[in-house]
Image (cartoon, grey):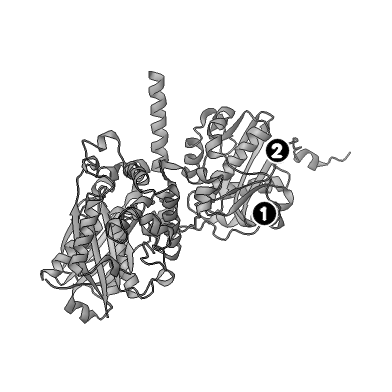
Amino acid sequence: MSVDLEKILRPVDSPMKPYEPKYMMLASGEAVVVRQVFRDEIPDLLKHVEPLLHVERDYYDVVAARVYAELLGYYQHRFQDQYVLALQVNGELAAIVNGRQVTPKLGLSLHTLALRRGLRIGAHGFAAKMQYHIDDLGHDEVLVVAESPIGFRRWMIEYKLEKRFDVPHELGGVPSWALTRELFDRVRSKLVVGRRPVPADILEKAMEKILPPSDPPTPPADPLAATRAMYDATATALVQQRWEMEKGAQDA
Amino acid sequence: MRDVYVAGIGITTFTRLEFPLSEIAAYASMMALKDAGVTEVDQLYVANMGAARVNHQTALASAVADSLSLLPAGAAAIENGPASGAAAIKAGFQAVASGMDDVVLVTGVERMREVNNLEATDFVATLTHPLTEYIYGVTLPAHAAMFARLYMEKYGVTERHLAMVGVKNQNAALNNEWAHLQQEITIEGILDSPEAMTNNPFVAEPLRFFDACPVSDGGAALILVSKEKAQELGGPMIRISGVGQATDTHAVFEREEPTDLLAVRKAAKDAFDMAGLTPDDVDVAELHDAFTILEIAESEEVGFFPKGEGHIALEKGETALGGRIPINVGGGLKGRGHPVGATGVAQAWEIVTQLRGDGGKRQVDGAKVGFTCNFGGFGNNVVCLTFVRED
């Protein structure tokens, strides 16, 4: 009797509500579209992620390598219950965010990779995927980790994430943090933006083709820049301040 | 008193720089020395505000002199808050004008991003009054916010006017390859759209994120020389024609009218009087827009517009490139960045660039007279300079 090994290797995805595209205006006045990308468009993303493997700045190399593997795993049916959202400005790829459903009540954030910097594009992308988890997929909480100090500042500090240090995150086995529905509702009015439906012309431009980013992150001019990014004093100070305040409140 | 000329200029990119403070200063200085065509100086002044506190380095001028092999030139550091840069230019001016020195290097430098943003904000706040301001948690954004609120109530300035300054200056920086911010912004994106409050949140109401300059590292340098030396070097003859400096009360609450910047008014008048010029003679100006409200207020106090009408001139486009008096065409502090000790020198760098006709896309056509206002403290120590191109 023959065995179709592919049936064993290929995970069966759980039904997940598709992400309805939305758009928002950036400080530059440009509209950025957030939309779900499915398997057929993954090769288009991969070729824009690959150059970032060689950017030794702000942990782009590590994040790009992992995103590349996740996208490839999704494309080749080796990753269960993953979704991928792309952010595009005039068709150009500006960011990729992805995550997955662990259980019907638990989500897991994988990565937020900004290919264009300086306009909160990554922050908008992260907010969009958290909204997808909480509002659309009905998750009670989402497990999150950060690989870069910038991510730590954006997620752990801005969203005031709760510790779930007893839960190893799928990314590197490091202690998890969690965005609960309650935490999300607290920041919703401040951090979560976007309009629906996306005007037809804007959506059409995004769907037409994923264009390469015109101003992607590049390697630092000097090796010293790479080492500098390994320590973010502000993030450290902010989280230390918060923990001291929490400890003070508990002691009181 | 001898005439004093700017024979060389240099600058680093303003951004987060990964190099030791003295190397940043040395890089800008090397560019200025090369630009002037000199290898020796009689004296160097290094403008800096935070080396001891932020970078754990003192005697910075000695370090810069040695790293540039300028020994045995005299060297001194000048700390005068955010007006350190122009104060150092004034010292260099005095050294050459008095006949004591023929060639003086003035370098401004700061590396603020070595520490976290909380510490950087705290470090700048140490310029406030220790007993009546600092201990109550007053920071410079807080000062500027209270000033802006008073200005809005008294003169009808709105958040839109503040945003217009921010857009004008940040977008001007797109034409300045050395500027920190290289990202276009629009009024719609930072003020009018449904997403504007997220894109541009309040930092200290009524000031928002895009109303404040970035925290930057960077350096800028000038070579000041006597007339004879300038003629010998053969470059464009850019003369520092006026120097004015004035102080005001340390604590802002002690001012009779907090919306009047009396030190700006006097420093500008003294500089214009010394130069034999009036504000109407100025072709291009650099004003200290650490916060957008300051550009509006300073544009009135230096005499470009009547008090309370700076925002009206802004509305009419009079302060934009191509307007009656273009202000901060290289981005100002808002777009170029604000490494505090370097800023006054960087303002002079921009004006000299303009008077040389080297401004590229941001060039003010036919610029012959330039003006800078370097604003220290919260207006308690201000240095203004005028520059003239002599053909």
Task: Name which of mark 2 and mark 1 comes first in the sequence.
Answer: 2
**Image point 29% across, 47% down: which residue?**
B259
Residue B155 at least partly seen: yes
Question: Which amino acid type is shown beneath numbered disc 2?
Answer: Asp
**Image point 59% across, 58% down: which residue?**
A213
Q: Secondary structure at mark 1?
A: helix
Label 1 packing within 10 angstroms: few (<14), some (14-19), many (20+): some
- Residue B8: image quadrant is bottom left
Residue B120 or B20: which is nearer the viewer?
A: B120
Mark whose residue sits in front, 2 or 1: 1
**In the picture provided, is A85 more to the left or to the right than B270?**
right
**Image point 53% across, 56% down: which residue?**
A54
Question: Which amino acid type is shown beneath numbered disc 1?
Answer: Ile
**In the picture provided, is A107 more to the left or to the right than B35?**
right
* Residue where numbered disc 2 is placed: A81
Dot 2 and dot 1 within a common chain:
yes
Residue B72 at least partly seen: no
* Residue where numbered disc 1 is placed: A202
Q: Quadrant of the N terminus of chain A?
A: top right
Q: Secondary structure at mark 2?
A: loop
